[in-house]
Image: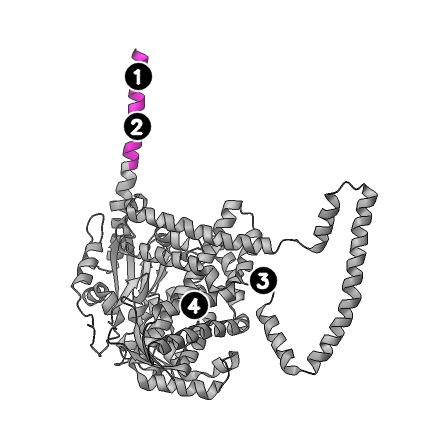
Amino acid sequence: MDLSLLLLKVMITIALLGFCSKLIQICDALILKPERIRSKLRKQGIRGPPPSFLLGNINDMKKKKKSTTSKIQPGEQALTHNCSSAVFPFFDLWRKQYGSTFMFSLGNMQILHTNHPDVVKEISICTSLDLGKPSYQHKERGPLLGHGILTSNGATWAHQRKILAPELYMEKVKDTMSLMVESSITLVNSWTNLIESEGGVADVHVDKYMRSFSGDAISRACFGSNYSKGEDIFSKLRELQEQMSKKVLFSGIPVLRHLPTKSKRETWRLEKEVHSLIMKVVKERKEGASQNDLLQMIIEGATNTDFGQDETDRFIVDNCKNIYLAGYETTAVSATWTLMLLASNPEWQQRVVKERKEGASQNDLLQMIIEGATNTDFGQDETDRFIVDNCKNIYLAGYETTAVSATWTLMLLASNPEWQQRVRTEVLEICADQMPDADMVRKMKTLTMVIHESLRLYPPVPVVSREAFRDMKFGDINVPKGVNVWTLMVSLHQDPDIWGPDANIFNPERFANGVSGACKLPYVYMPFGVGPRICAGQHFAMAELKILLALIVSNFSFSLSPKYRHSPALCLLIEPEHGVNLLIKKL
C-alpha cells in the first residue's frame, strides 16, 4: 500500500511538473518574451500603441478601420488614390503619433514598422539568410502558400529560386508572348460578343475576365495546359484566399491556429481539394512522359505469347525491321518533297515555325518543379509537398496579382480618358494591324508608364515583411531576434516627401524617364519587391499586362460605370472591394 501511494505521489508530482512547465512555456510565449522584445525596442526610443493581453493591438486596428468612412459612394466621380489611408488607417494614425518607426503587436507577435528610407534600403538589399520571410506566413497561410518560394528561407528557398527563376527570365518570357496574345484574344472576343448582345455598349464587371485571362496565360505558359484544365484549381485557390483573408488580423494568436472552427474546417477542406487537383495535373504530366512507345508495345506483344525464346526474338527483330524499313525510306522521300514545298511557300513555312515554337516539348515551369523535386533526397510526401507548394505559389503569384493589377489599371485608364487615348494612339502606331510581339511590347513607353503608375498607387502586395532569425542591426536600429519587420510599401509609394505634392494623383508622366527618374529615392518603388527576394516573375507579369492592355485599348473604349464604387480593400492583396464595372464600346 505504501508503495502504491508513493507511486501515486510520484505520478502526481510528474504531472504537476509537466503542467507547470507547460504553463511557464505558455506564459513566456504570451507575456514574457513579447515584453522582453518590446523592452529592447523601447530602450532605443522606439514607441508604439500599448498592447492588450492576448490580442495585442488587433482591437485597436479593427476599431480604427471601422471608423474610417472615406469610401466613395456610387455615382460619385471624384476618386481618391490614397490607398494607404483607406486600407491601413491605423498605420497612418500611429505614424503621426510615434513617427515613421514604431512597434505594435498582433497577438503575441511583435512587429517593428519602419518607413525610414535608409533603413528600408538596408533591409531590402540584405542578403543574410538570418533575415527571411516571417514564420507566421507559413503557420497562418500554410494552406494557401505552404513552403513554396514565397514563404521558404535558407537552402530550401535557394534551391527553389534556382529552379524557377531561369524559366522566368526575359528570353524565356519572349517565347510565351504568343500564348499571352491568344489568351488576350479570347477575352477580346468575349467582350465583342457581349457588346453586340447588349446593343453597342456593355456594362462589364471586369474582374472575372481579368482572372480568366491571367489564369489562361499562366496555365498555357507555365503548366502546359489551358485555362479550362486549371479552372478548378484557380477557383479553389480563390476560395481559399478569401477564406483565409477573413482572419488576417488574428495572425499572432497561436491558440486560434489549431481550433477546429467552421472556418478552419472549410480551409482544411479547400487545402485538400487544391492538393488533389494539382497532383492530378502532375500525374498526367508524368504519365505523358512515360516510355509508352512502339518498341515497348512490340516487346510486350512478344512477351504476352506462348513463343519460345527464339520465336520471341524473331518476332521482335522482324517487326522492328518492318518498321525501320517502312518508316525509313518512305519518310525520307516524303520529307524531301515537303521541304521543297515549304521552300517554295514561305508563308506556310512561317506558320509551321510558329506552331512548332508554341507546341514545343514540355520543358516548362511545371516540368522544372517536378525535376527539382525529383533531384533531391526527399521522400514521397516531401516530393509531393514541394511540387504542390510551389505550384500554389506560382498560381497565386502569376494569377491573382496580375489579374488585380490589370483591373486597377483599367479603372485608372477609364477615369483618365486622355491617358487612355495616349496609350491607344501609341499601341495602334506600333502594332498597326499586327498582334503585339516582344519587339513591339518593348517600344510601348506610354503604356509602361501607365502600368508603373498603377503599380505605384495600387501595389497588389502592400507590405514587405521580414523576420530576424538572430539579433541584427539596420541603420541605428538593433532588431532583436524574433521581431517581424514591416515596410508599408503602399505608404512609401505615396509619400509626398519622396514623390512630390501630387503623390496621391494619377500622373504616369512621372515615369517618363523610367523608374530612376520618377522620384527622389527610386529604390522605395518596389511593386515587385527588391534585393535577393525580388519577384522572379516580374518580366512575365509586365509582359502579360502590356499585351492584354494593348489589345483592350486597341479594340475598345471604356469609361467608369455608374455602378462603380471605389473602395480598395485588403484580401491578402489590395483589391477593389466591390470589383470594377466599366462601360465598354467596340471601336
Task: Find residue 271 and report its horizontal and vertical position in percent.
Answer: 40, 50
Task: Find residue 484 and report its horizontal and vertical position in percent.
Answer: 33, 56
Q: Which residue is mark 1?
A: 6
Q: Amino acid at mark 3?
A: Gln
For residue 538, say whether it is visible: yes
Instruction: Compare marks 1 and 4 and give the one earlier in the sequence.
Output: 1
Q: Which residue is mark 4?
A: 214
53 and 343: which one is in front? 343
Spatial distance from mark 1 to mark 3, Cα to Cα? Answer: 70 Å
Instruction: Compare marks 1 and 3 and give the one earlier in the sequence.
Output: 1
What residue is drawn where x is 44% and y is 84%?
Answer: 427
Task: Find residue 104 and report its horizontal and vertical position in percent.
Answer: 24, 57
Q: Are marks 4 and 2 in contact (CB under 8 Å)?
A: no
Spatial distance from mark 1 to mark 4, Cα to Cα? Answer: 70 Å
Element at badge 4?
helix
Spatial distance from mark 4 to mark 2, Cα to Cα? Answer: 56 Å
Instruction: Compare marks 1 and 2 and give the one earlier in the sequence.
Output: 1
As displayed, is residue 445 above or below residue 533? below
The range drawn in magenta is 1-22
Q: Which residue is mark 3?
A: 362
Instruction: Compare marks 2 and 3 and give the one earlier in the sequence.
Output: 2
> Which callout, 1 or 4, points to the residue nearer the camera?
4
Spatial distance from mark 2 to mark 3, Cα to Cα? Answer: 59 Å
Q: Is residue 20 magenta?
A: yes
Instruction: Compare marks 4 and 2 and give the one earlier in the sequence.
Output: 2
Pointer 1 local density, CA inside 10 Å: few below 14, some 14–19, many at least 20: few
Q: How is the image coloured?
A: one colour
